[in-house]
Image (cartoon, grey):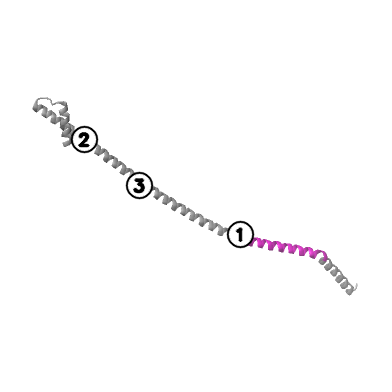
Amino acid sequence: MNLTLTLIAQAVVFALFIWAVVAWIWPRLLEAIEARQKAIADGLAEAERGKNSLAEAKKETDKMLAEARARAQEIVAQAEKQAATRIEESKSAAKTEGDRLLASANAQIQQEVQSAKQQLREQVAALAVAGAEKILKREVDAKAHADMLGQLKAQL
């Protein structure tokens, strides 16, 4: 066979092969490549959105933690303030109660002193009457006795 004819036949077969590849295989390869590129681009975009979302979530979490810490400190400060107020109220109530008990005790002491003075007056009057009775060797009249005791009480 002739070399030229072989070359031409090979060129025609090669051209048919290229035309078949371009007509049927090449579009499918391009579709697969484009789909893969789109999937990669979408994945990268999604990763970037995820990274941004993660950064936003971290910022939000930090903000919430700061707010929670501030609120916790506020609650602790408020609790300490309430405790101090309750302590002061308890001290005030205890002082008031102590003052009331002291006043009550003083009033009771004054009452007992008056009672003791009254009993002492009566005993002194009774002793005076008994002494006068012994001196006079006679009993004094009850009405006169009551008058004398009243005067003696008034004097004491």
Q: SS at mark 3? A: helix
Q: Which residues are magenta?
A: 23-51
What is the three-letter code of the residue carrying label 3?
Answer: Ser
Task: Confirm whether residue 156 shows in the render.
Answer: no
Left of 88 or right of it: where is 7? right
Which residue lies under the disc numbered 3? 92
The image position of residue 109, as x and y in percent, is 25, 38
What is the three-letter code of the residue carrying label 2?
Answer: Ala
Q: Earlier in the sequence, mark 1 or mark 3?
A: 1
Q: SS at mark 1? A: helix
Q: SS at mark 2? A: helix
The image position of residue 65, as x and y in percent, is 52, 56
Residue 152, image quadrant: top left
Looking at the image, which residue is at 29% across and 42% down? 103
What is the three-letter code of the residue carrying label 1?
Answer: Ser
Checking the image for residue 53, the label placed there is 1
Indicate yes or no whether the magenta region holds residue 110.
no
Q: Marks 2/1: CA distance?
A: 91 Å
Looking at the image, which residue is at 48% across and 53% down? 72
Say which quadrant the C terminus sits in.
top left
